Amino acid sequence: MLLLDLVAGAVTMKRIDDMAWEHLASVHGANRAASQREDESFRKARLIVLPLVAVLLIVLLVIATS
């Protein structure tokens, strides 16, 4: 009976552990689809913002030197 109790306890602990990790992943948005969408949106934003900032800095430097 002791061995049976240990196995049942281990299975229960594994189930609790799995549920805890699933909960953490769902709470923190750790699913891959959301992070891929976020990565794609950040990549698109960088493609737009980086050239705009570069042009703005060049314009400010031209104005400051004249």
Image (cartoon, rainbow, N blue to C red):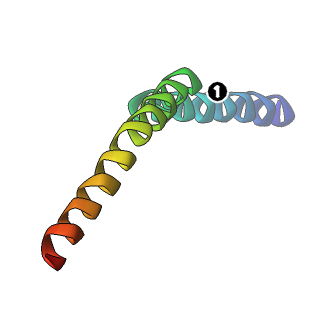
Disc 1 is placed on an element classified as helix
Q: Quadrant of the N terminus?
A: top right
In this rendering, the count of numbered labels is 1
Asked if residue 33 lies left or right of residue 28, the reply is right
Task: Please state which amino acid type lies under the numbered disc 1.
Answer: Arg
Vertical comparison of 57 with 40: above or below: below
Give the image location of residue 57, x and y in percent.
Answer: 26, 62
Asked if residue 23 lies left or right of residue 12, the reply is left
**Residue at 30%, 53% in the rendered image:** 55
Q: Residue furthest bottom?
A: 65
Vertical comparison of 60 with 36: above or below: below
**Residue at 18%, 78% in the rendered image:** 65
**Residue at 62%, 30% in the rendered image:** 18
**Residue at 55%, 21% in the rendered image:** 33
Asked if residue 60 lies left or right of residue 46, the reply is left
Q: Quadrant of residue 29?
A: top left
Q: Residue furthest top?
A: 33
Local crowd size for mark 1, using a 10 Å CA cut-off: few (<14), some (14–19), many (≥20)? few
Give the image location of residue 63, x and y in percent.
Answer: 14, 68
Give the image location of residue 19, x and y in percent.
Answer: 55, 27
The residue indicated by pointer 1 is 15
Q: Which is more toward the observer, 61 or 17?
A: 61
Give the image location of residue 47, x and y in percent.
Answer: 44, 38
Q: Which is more toward the observer, 21 or 25?
A: 25
Q: Quadrant of the C terminus?
A: bottom left
Q: Quadrant of residue 13?
A: top right
Q: Which is more toward the observer, 25 or 33?
A: 33
